[in-house]
Amino acid sequence: MAVERTFSIIKPDATARNLGGAINAMIEKAGLRIVAQKRVLISRAQAETFYGVHRERPFFRELVDFMTSGPVVVQVLEGENAIVRYRDLMGATDPAKAAANTIRKAFAQSIGENSVHGSDAADTAQKEIAQFFSANEIVG
Ligand code: GDP
């Protein structure tokens, strides 16, 4: 199995409730290494680019409003099979459907305010990491 990097966001609902440390503890306990991390405010333009694939969805405006409503923590996670392992750790998009011991089951408030983002594939991981980090900010 290959060592991969994936992109993660601790979303505004989670930073507002001071859950960064608790989420990072779950990430590290799952065996993923946080190799880059910063707390930022995302601009509307950044959010619209990041979620461009959802531009036509009815919830797009709400999603951009939410992601720009407060600080987020953007991260790069590293580990074997990191992309799928982090998706498993996050749990289903809708917390009502999330499995036990997942971040969204533990912390998410709704299908929109669901505490974390994680890349869904290798090509998106690469693009998402590049949107927020330069190579010298990632220290494995
Ligand atoms: P993810 O990969 O599990 O994050 O899910 P998606 O790629 O399908 O959706 C991206 C993000 O859009 C989700 O994490 C939610 O924050 C938001 N989202 C998805 N579906 C809905 C919805 O029906 N309503 C609202 N308000 N937000 C949604």
Image: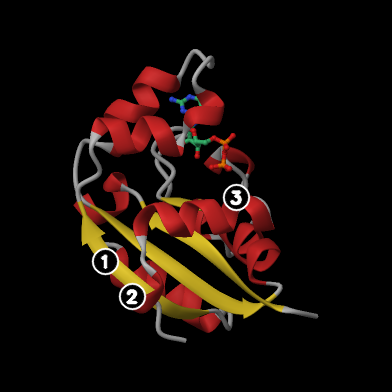
What residue did someone put label 1 on?
Answer: 38
Pick out the residue farthest to the bottom: 140
In three-dimensional space, the C-alpha distance between marks 1 and 3, rounded to whole angstroms, equals 19 Å
Q: Is residue 110 above or below residue 131?
A: above
N-term mark: 2 or 1: 1
Closer to the camera in the image, 7 or 137: 137
> Within 10 Å of the Cα at label 1, are there few (<14), some (14-19), or many (20+) other Cα atoms?
few
Numbered disc in front, either 1 or 3: 3
The colouring scheme, among rainbow, by chain, secondary structure or one colour, is secondary structure
**Residue 123 x, y percent position in the rendering:** 65, 53
Q: Secondary structure at mark 3?
A: helix
**Residue 119 x, y percent position in the rendering:** 57, 53
Q: Is residue 13 above or below residue 8?
A: above
Amino acid carrying label 2: it is Glu
Identified at 36% across, 19% down, the residue is 61
Disc number placed over residue 137 in the picture, else none: 2
N-term mark: 2 or 3: 3
In three-dimensional space, the C-alpha distance between marks 2 and 1, rounded to whole angstroms, equals 10 Å
> Within 10 Å of the Cα at label 2, are there few (<14), some (14-19), or many (20+) other Cα atoms?
few
Identified at 57% across, 57% down, the residue is 125
**Residue 73 x, y percent position in the rendering:** 30, 59
Pick out the residue farthest to the right: 1
Residues tagged 2 and 1 counted as in contact (Cβ below 8 A): yes
Residue 17 appears in the picture as rendered? no
State which quarter of the image contains the N terminus: bottom right
Amino acid carrying label 3: it is Thr
Residue 82 appears in the picture as rendered? yes
Q: Secondary structure at mark 1?
A: strand
What residue did someone put label 3 on?
Answer: 124
Closer to the camera in the image, 5 or 91: 5
